[in-house]
Image (cartoon, rainbow, N blue to C red):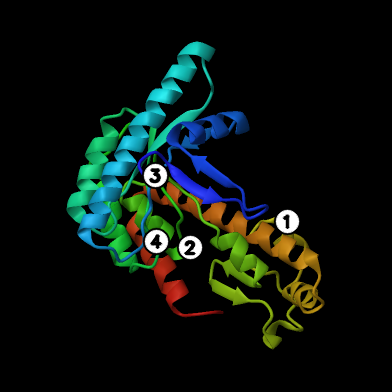
Amino acid sequence: MDEGVRFRSHLDGSEHLLTPEKAVEIQLALGSDIAMVLDECIETPAPHEKAEAAVRRTTEWARRARHYFLEYATRNGNLGQRQFGIVQGATFSDLRRESARQVAELDFPGYAVGGLAVGEPHAMTCEMTGEGTALLPRDRPRYLMGVGRPEQLADYVALGIDMMDCVLPTRAARHACLYTSEGRVLIKSARYAQDQQPIDPACACSVCRRYTRAYLRHLFAAGELTAAILATHHNVHFYLDIMRQIREAIEFGNLGKFSSEMHARYAAGPV
């Protein structure tokens, strides 16, 4: 519906209406540094007509959210919050470009590319990301929502993306999958039962400095909650370090080489 999104609470079944304005209010109350507008993210694949309608609705909701946010800021002074518009358009180049143009006209402090990495091939994700970023202001941060695997991050940066977020490092950690400079480590494997190496000898995180693969495997085997905590700490540190290496590669003009090496390491499967 054009007014907003109506849903039922999973706690008590009560019905609620989330409008673009209500989404702004909630994020202001939370005090987030970055606030996202309400948008319509549809399934993939989807017909062109449905994707086009979702772009229209996303733009209209973005317009309402921006107006409400600016009115609130006028009444209450500097909020210290940055509101981002969102580009949609599914896997259609024309709709991605049109959505980017429409959202850019609303003059947000930053922009997000949404509705990708939802089942389409990585090459398609990159193509649609490029269509959007090509038309977004170069002097504003650009955020690709919900990505990605370690070897893919440099690909998105090369397309003009500044920021990314993903559940993968934490979700994989809970399932005993650890990311390393040499590839994935599936720590529950019997091969690590006596392995006294750190998870990643090249990693400087506190987990790699203090614990062995054998010990972490033991924690998972024993069902200890500490296992997921330590694995999560390592994976998040690893992702942050990838971004550090990407910035370094850009500075030295080696981003393409860095990306190729990451793809090669992870194409080989678990180490």
Residue located beneath label 4 in the image = 117
| Quadrant of residue 193 within the rendered picture | bottom right
Q: Nearer the viewer, residue 88 or 155?
A: 88
Name which of mark 4 and mark 3 comes first in the sequence: 3
Q: Which amino acid does the dot numbered 1 rest on?
A: Ser
Q: Nearer the viewer, residue 36 or 18?
A: 18
Whether tag 4 and tag 2 are in contact, CB under 8 A, the answer is no
Tag 2 secondary structure: helix
Tell me if residue 63 can be seen. yes
Query: In front of the other: label 4 or label 2?
Result: 4
Name the mark on residue 228: none
Q: Position of residue 155 (x, y in %)?
A: 35, 58
**Distance between mark 1 and mark 3 Cα atoms:** 39 Å
The relative height of residue 73 versus residue 58 in the rendered view (above or below) is: above
| Quadrant of residue 109 within the rendered picture | top left
Whether tag 2 and tag 3 are in contact, CB under 8 A, the answer is no
Q: Position of residue 101 (x, y in %)?
A: 22, 38
Name the mark on residue 39: 3
Residue drawn at x 72%, y 65% is 228
Q: Residue furthest bottom?
A: 190
**Distance between mark 4 and mark 2 Cα atoms:** 14 Å
Q: Position of residue 17 (x, y in %)?
A: 50, 41
Residue located beneath label 2 in the image = 150
Q: Position of residue 90 (x, y in %)?
A: 29, 56
Tag 1 secondary structure: helix
Q: Nearer the viewer, residue 47 or 77?
A: 47
